[in-house]
Image (cartoon, grey):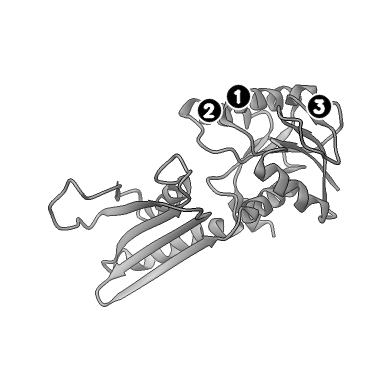
């Protein structure tokens, strides 16, 4: 059984993952880390990762950007593997992720959903078929009104998946309000919608003459991200140092 530390255990995603692991015979949360301690847990909770005094195999992180550098330093020093789910990392933090992966196993993905990560492959294959046939590519993402960044990291990752199949020849366009011209061929349009409590919806549209193909993923709860994080932790627990992503988790199934 994989023994995991839940970093950010008392946040919403930490609670969802804790509940998921209770019903999973292959993984157990043996400790948590959170500055807020006003929640009852079935495992000990520490205020910082360096104070954890129980044995474990892997860390699942759903915390805050401000905690990432200290977490990575701990993993580097103690050779502990980590599933990094916190988003909004700066370029400097991403460089730290790369450096840490030389000393421990780090799994990071723009989206932890197994469905979205399968979508990346589907988009690559669809782009290889449709781009040469003259289809335009547009991506529309929808999220709740509390989301700070736009477009989402997942929308950008989907665009990257399409562009990878195009040898990186296409440009990204985030709005056309300032333009008055026909749509150029070599671009991927990315649009963001913010409203209500939409958990997450991503559409990749391939629009050609007389036909439109849409590949769509809808998340109805944050449980899909929690499930992906748990599967990633089970995959990563015994892996050697290196940088991993969800595509490898899916391929391992």
Q: Position of residue 160 (x, y in %)?
A: 41, 49
Where residue 169 appears, as percent x and y from the top left, is: 30, 49
The residue depicted at 26 percent of the width and 66 percent of the height is 134
Q: Nearer the viewer, residue 50 or 101?
A: 50
SS label for mark 3: loop
Numbered tag placed on residue 239 in the rendering: none
Instruction: Say which element carries label 1.
Output: helix
Q: Are marks 1 and 2 in contact (CB under 8 Å)?
A: yes
User: Which comes sooner in the sequence, label 3 or label 1?
Assistant: 3
Q: Nearer the viewer, mark 2 or mark 3?
A: 3
Compared to residue 237, the image places residue 158 above or below, namely below
* Label located before the other in sequence (1 or 2): 1
Q: Residue furthest left?
A: 180
CA distance for labels 2 and 3 = 23 Å
The alpha-carbon separation of the residues under discs 3 and 1 comes to 17 Å
CB under 8 Å between discs 3 and 1: no
In the rendered view, does 26 fall on the left or right side of 145? right
For the residue carrying disc 3, how many other residues have a C-alpha within 10 Å: few (<14), some (14-19), or many (20+)?
Answer: some
Q: Position of residue 82 (x, y in %)?
A: 69, 36
3D distance between C-alphas at marks 1 and 2 = 7 Å
Q: Which residue is mark 1?
A: 69
Which residue carries the number 2 mark?
93
Which quadrant is the C terminus positioned in?
A: bottom right
Which numbered dot is residue 52? 3
Residue at x 48%, y 29% (from the top left corner) = 90
Q: Earlier in the sequence, mark 2 or mark 3?
A: 3
């Amino acid at each position: 059984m994989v023994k995991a530390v839940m970093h950010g255990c008392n946040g919403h995603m930490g609670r969802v993952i804790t509940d998921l692991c209770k019903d999973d015979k292959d993984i157990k949360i043996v400790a948590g880390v959170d500055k807020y301690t006003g929640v009852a847990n079935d495992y000990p909770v520490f205020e910082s990762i360096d104070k954890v005094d129980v044995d474990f195999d892997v860390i699942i992180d759903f915390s805050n950007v401000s905690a990432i550098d200290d977490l990575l330093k701990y993993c580097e020093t103690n050779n502990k593997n980590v599933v990094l789910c916190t988003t909004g990392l700066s370029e400097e933090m991403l460089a730290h992720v790369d450096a840490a992966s030389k000393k421990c196993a780090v799994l990071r993905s723009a989206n932890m959903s197994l469905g979205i990560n399968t979508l990346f492959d589907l988009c690559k294959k669809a782009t290889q078929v449709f781009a040469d046939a003259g289809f335009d590519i547009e991506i529309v993402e929808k999220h709740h009104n509390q989301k700070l960044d736009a477009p989402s990291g997942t929308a950008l990752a989907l665009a990257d998946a399409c562009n990878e199949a195009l040898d990186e020849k296409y440009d990204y366009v985030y709005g056309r309000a300032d333009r008055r011209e026909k749509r150029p061929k070599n671009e991927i349009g990315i649009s963001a919608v913010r409203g209500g409590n939409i958990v997450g919806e991503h559409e990749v549209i391939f629009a050609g003459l007389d036909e439109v193909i849409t590949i769509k993923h809808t998340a109805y709860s944050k449980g899909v991200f929690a499930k992906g994080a748990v599967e990633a932790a089970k995959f990563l627990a015994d892996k050697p140092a290196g940088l991993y992503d969800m595509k490898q988790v899916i391929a391992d199934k």
